[in-house]
Image: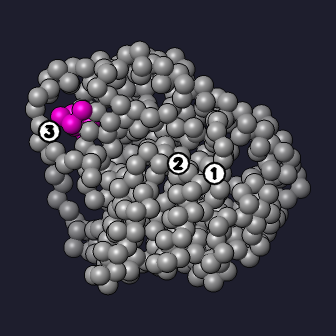
Amino acid sequence: MMKSTFAHMFSKSSNNMKSSEIRELLKLLNSPEMISFAGGLPNPDAFPIEKLKPVMDHVMASHARDALQYGTTEGHNKLRDVIARGMGEHYGAPQQMSNILITNGSQQGLNLISKVFLNPGDKVLTGNPTYLGAIMAFVAHEASISAVTIDEQGMVPELLEDKLKYLDRRKEHPKFMYLVPTFQNPTGVTIPHKRREKIYEIMCKYDLILVEDDPYGLLRFEGKREPLMKSFDDENRVIYLGTFSKILAPGFRVGWMAAPEEIIRKVSIAKQAEDLCTNSFGQFCVFEAMYHNILFPHIEEIVNLYRKKRDLMIDALETHFPKDVRWNKPQGGLFLWLVMPDYINTLTMLPKAIENNVAYVTGEPFFPNGGGHNTMRLNYSYATDDQIVEGIKRLADVIKEFIDENKGKIAEDYVSIP
Ligand code: PMP
Ligand code: G9A
């Protein structure tokens, strides 16, 4: 390994940072033969390119002096205002503009929340598994994550309450809880209405704040929409994170936070030091895309596209995969979650898959407290239809071979999913 010149100079907190298995993997997947089910990427063929061109022309023709200028840290007011009203119209959780801060994607929201709430050693509650990017943000701020087992309906209220009682006895009150209640990354699981109410009730009882991360809620293919946790929030304990990344385009890097004004104020001071403001041009484009009615027809289009891709992937799994692998059928979002037999370690299998030009994300990094060695996440939005069929065939061959080699063995690092 290269001798380090700077190791003694890096900060303690930088040594706590862990790199993202997903982002590192994405760098390796640039060969044209590779079929990637790895990153949670929207389909680029579906970007509304032709519709966005006139929007961008309009921004340059009519708003260039502001769109090319720095903006306020809180964000472009017209965008904040339309989001505040939209949260009422589309989510039953109306906001004032002063409750909205525009972020450089919801990933920044996660980092800013960590920055303003977490001291080293503070507890954060999450599901087990949960979104890797959130784990990274919490760990970078030296939080200690306490993860609560989830089932096929997401966080289990009884287990949450048990965990809170346990932490109470140890006088370790969590700073906040983090959930992706709808079409969770990585499992695709959605918490049903009744459970959401129960979880909110427990939050009130134990004086808990919730970070509700919701990039996928509008990508629903079928079934009834579940209310936002934010829509129950009489006690002002929910910090909601939204983003245009999956419903329009992640390249704009525009998301938002909806929270009590006191939190917005604190977070915007933290953001001042981080990036001064979210990129103005992106914010203007997103606002105009909404104003010119491009956003919601686009969402309808990708919902139809992704529903077909989910079905195609599930058909291919049913046709080609061995019967002892299990998967779910989420009603939306971008991911399927697969559970292999215990003796399969998906991390050990990954190089074989990559050699065969197919990639997935291993499940283990999504488990803050360990587990999931035999799980994997498959993204179905990014690949073409032909690639989905071919990629699942390739993956099935890799898995069958691996099963033959490993059947009867216990995976070396066997940790059962709690
Ligand atoms: N939260 C979750 C649950 C995600 O899946 C993602 C992206 N994959 C993000 C946050 C970050 O998205 P962005 O910063 O692009 O808004
Ligand atoms: O890191 C990215 O590119 C966003 C996608 C996240 C994911 O795959 O979970």
Indicate whether 269 appears above or below 141: below
Q: Earlier in the sequence, mark 1 or mark 2?
A: 2
Magenta-drawn segment:
341-348
Residue located beneath label 2 in the image: 190
Q: Quadrant of residue 281?
A: bottom right
Give the x, y percent position of residue 22. Answer: 39, 45
Label 1 environment density (alpha carbons within 10 Å; few <14, some 14–19, many ≥20): some
- The amino acid pointed to by label 3 is Ala
Residue located beneath label 3 in the image: 411
Taking depth in this image into account, of 391 and 47 the one nearest to the observer is: 391
- The amino acid pointed to by label 1 is Glu
Label 2 environment density (alpha carbons within 10 Å; few <14, some 14–19, many ≥20): many
Q: Secondary structure at mark 2?
A: loop
Taking depth in this image into account, of 78 and 325 the one nearest to the observer is: 325
Q: CA distance from mark 1 to mark 2?
A: 8 Å
Q: Residue at x 57, y 37 (%)?
A: 331
Examine the rendering and report whether any part of residue 343 can be seen: yes
Query: Tag count in the figure?
Result: 3
Give the x, y percent position of residue 121. Answer: 31, 78
Q: CA distance from mark 2 to mark 3?
A: 30 Å
- Tell me whether the residue at label 1 lies in contact with that at label 2, contact meaning CB atoms closer than 8 angstroms: yes
Residue located beneath label 1 in the image: 226
Q: Of the residues tagged 2 and 3, which is closer to the observer?
A: 2
Taking depth in this image into account, of 386 and 364 the one nearest to the observer is: 364
Q: Earlier in the sequence, mark 2 or mark 3?
A: 2
- The amino acid pointed to by label 2 is Thr
Examine the rendering and report whether any part of residue 140 can be seen: no
Indicate whether 368 appears above or below 275: above
Q: Is mark 3 within 8 Å of ligand 2?
A: no
